[in-house]
Image (spheres, rainbow, N blue to C red):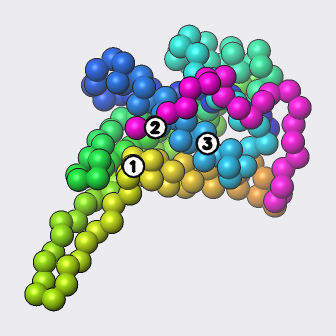
Amino acid sequence: PTALMVPFTMMQAMQPHQSEYTAQEVSRIFWQTWLKEEMLPVIEYDTSKDLYSLNRALAAAKAKGADLLITGQIPYFLSGGTLGLTQVAVRVEIYDVASAELLWSFVHGGNIQVKETRDYIFFDAESKVPADPVYVVCRVLAHDIGSIVKDWISPSQQNPPKVDGMQNRSKDTGGGAF
């Protein structure tokens, strides 16, 4: 099956531009993880602003010939950077494009806690926090959810065939990171 993925919706109150940017980047991490792990033969990520409504996203997926629509929500987001607690919660929804039926709804969350340095007489123990904890948490969440979907789609198929039509790249040319 082929899929169209649209950016998740930020449910938490944030500045409007920050909310949209954060949601697109969290979604992009999921998309990139799923491409790398070949969750589906084809996943196109479209960041067009007019696809934030479910009906419009389903219509766009149908027009592109996709079998599935991947969308979602980010109910909770806290970026503590390298000094504080980072937490991300997501809801990922996968729809059948032909029937508009919700096939899967996953809710998952994760966090990275920073432990303070503990000083001892002879040595110092430090916790090493990744430079971008949000990226690490989102990659783990995407991997967990993607593994389940991949097993559901093709439980015995190791290397799915490549499908013509949709492209495995984003229409959005801007990269980005937090």
Q: CA distance from mark 2 to mark 1?
A: 9 Å
The region drawn magenta spans: 157-178
Q: CA distance from mark 3 to mark 1?
A: 16 Å
Q: Secondary structure at mark 3?
A: helix
Q: How many marks?
A: 3
On the image, numbered disc 3 is attached to which residue?
32
Instruction: Find residue 89 and name its label.
Output: none
Q: Is residue 7 visible?
A: yes
In the image, residue 121 sits, relative to residue 126, either above or below, namely: below
Identify the mark nearer the N-term, 3 or 2.
3
Tag 2: residue type?
Ala
Identify the mark nearer the N-term, 3 or 1.
3
The residue furthest left is: 121
Q: Position of residue 49 (x, y in %)?
A: 53, 13
In the image, residue 164 sits, relative to residue 147, either above or below, namely: above
- Kindly identify the residue that appears in the image at 62 percent across and 24 percent down: 173
Q: Secondary structure at mark 2?
A: loop
- Kindly identify the residue that appears in the image at 10 percent across and 87 percent down: 121
Assess whether mark 1 and mark 2 are in contact (beta carbons under 8 angstroms): yes
On the image, numbered disc 1 is attached to which residue?
132
Q: Residues within 10 Å of mark 2 (few under 14, many from 20)?
A: few
Q: Position of residue 52 (x, y in %)?
A: 52, 17
Assess whether mark 2 and mark 3 are in contact (beta carbons under 8 angstroms): no
Looking at the rendering, which quadrant does residue 35 occupy? top right
